[in-house]
Image (cartoon, rainbow, N blue to C red):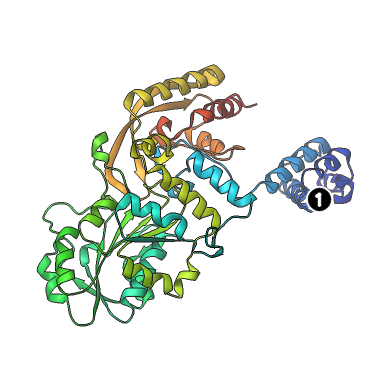
Amino acid sequence: MDKKQLLSAIPKVDEILNTKDILDITVSVPRHIVADATREVLENAREDIINDKCDTIDIKNIICDIKDMAIQKNRNHLRRVINASGIIIHTNLGRSLLCSEAIDAVSSAARHYCNLEFDIEKKQRGSRYSHIEWIIREITGAESAMAVNNNAAAVLLALSTLCKNREAIVSRGELVEIGGSFRIPDVMELSGAKLIEVGTTNRTHLYDYENAISENTGALLKIHTSNYRIVGFTESVSGRDIAPLAHKNDVPVIMDIGSGNFVDFTKYGISGEPTVQDAIKSGIDIVTFSGDKMLGGPQAGLIVGKKKYIDLMKKNPLTRAVRLDKMTIAALEATLRKYLDIEDAVKTIPTLRMITLSADELEKKAVKLLNMIKNSAGDYADLSIMREYSEVGGGSMPLENLPTFAVSIKPLNITINELEKRLRNASIPIIARTYKDSLLMDARTIGDDEFNIIADTLYHILRGV
């Protein structure tokens, strides 16, 4: 058949839409999505004919392509993936996983009415902050607490409340940028605070802060450099040292510690992040941190510290723009409750559990995954177990490499890049990492219930079925 005959053999859209196979799929996929897929597949067929990439028209294949594309188009854009990368708090993959209690709490809040802003005992309007404030006070020893929608908002609200049209003094070595172009100087400018830089990039002394304090100083600002470290000839001022200076001059100290950490990880042989408890004990007036990093909860920005300052923040008009919704509060409360027993939190909050997994546990997981892959597709790849390193991620513990075990996959019939691409485009995408001529799946971040999915996906990819 020549091009003209092939082009004329392409069926019309209406003809395709009225075939039994296509009518059947419209039961589960909206008709307009099926129609869009039909037009796209038919247009692709025309282009293939024009570009000499096709010399026949197979209606069955066209219908199969339409069904596949319609199903693909009908999938949620935000969907589940399997994290085999070994990065625990993976920002691109949604950061921390919630514990089962938090998931149940979200489901309940979504399905039913709740006392979000209703005081049941007093039969009057209540505060949405009351659901989490008492727990944070119990865990940290702080006088008061509130939560907003992320840590950038927490820093913005604190500065807007305490430093608007006033000076905020911060070390040059702490003027950080973290993921998503979140820059401390930009947040300070947006808050209305005037940035006063002190010290140098690598060395800042207590007298630098003291010399900069004036009658227009709103606060001293400490930023934990969570996602990088300056090493070598360095000097910085701790919160414990800066607090007395601030209080002597009747100004507050705001400290952003980045990851909300309540656990002393040195007990698990890991060099830990600063804890919120230590910051409060050191005399810091306001501490801000994330809820979805080391804390292991939902996206949130928590603000803890002196009641007089937090009460002012609650009255700031900006608070309404950054407040939490009921489902986030439900997840946050359930997560925080776990910290009333730290040992239970470490065992049951997924992020903490993954960070503290022992070498024996990781090796057993890797061996189990290896054997399942061998049983499904062992003849189509060289498989082995490698000693590797995981990362905490999310800007937390940037210098900490966690020893782990990973399954190494070297496909025999396709390239590493093609395997990585096909895994990424699977019905449940699997995100792994490549190393030299292998694809690695880190046992640390893969759930036991995901092994079957990985083995089955590799079966179809490597066998070409």
Please name whichever residue, 171 or 16, is drawn nearer the observer in this view of the structure.
171
Residue 4 lies, in percent from the top left, at 84, 48
Q: Say if 376 sits above or below 76 in the image.
A: above
Location of the C terminus by quadrant is: top right
Q: Could you tell me which residue is drawn at 78 percent across and 48 percent down?
A: 34
**What residue is pinned by disc 1?**
31
5 lies above or below 386:
below
In this picture, residue 9 sits left or right of residue 208:
right
Residue at 36% across / 74% down in the picture? Answer: 161
Amino acid carrying label 1: it is Arg
Q: Quadrant of residue 367?
A: top left
Is the N terminus in the top left, top right, bottom left or bottom right quadrant?
top right
At horizontal 32% and vertical 70% (from top left) the residue drawn is 308
Residue 419 x/y as whole percent: 52, 33
Q: In which quarter of the image is residue 358?
A: top left
Whole-percent x and y of residue 55?
77, 39
**Nearest the eye: 308 or 446:** 308
Q: Is mark 1 on a helix, strand or loop?
A: helix
Q: What percent of the width, then of the height, locates residue 282? A: 20, 57
Residue 227 seen in the current view: no
Q: In this view, does 332 lie to the left or right of 227?
A: right
Q: In front: 99, or 454?
A: 99
The answer to whether residue 324 shows anywhere in this view is yes
| Above/below status of 172 relative to 401 | below
Q: Is 414 displayed left or right of 71 in the figure?
A: left
Q: Which residue lies furthest to the front in this view?
A: 122
- Taking the image as shown, residue 76 lies to the left or right of residue 210, namely right
Number of marks in picture: 1
Within 10 angstroms of label 1, few (less than 14), some, or many (20 or more) residues? some
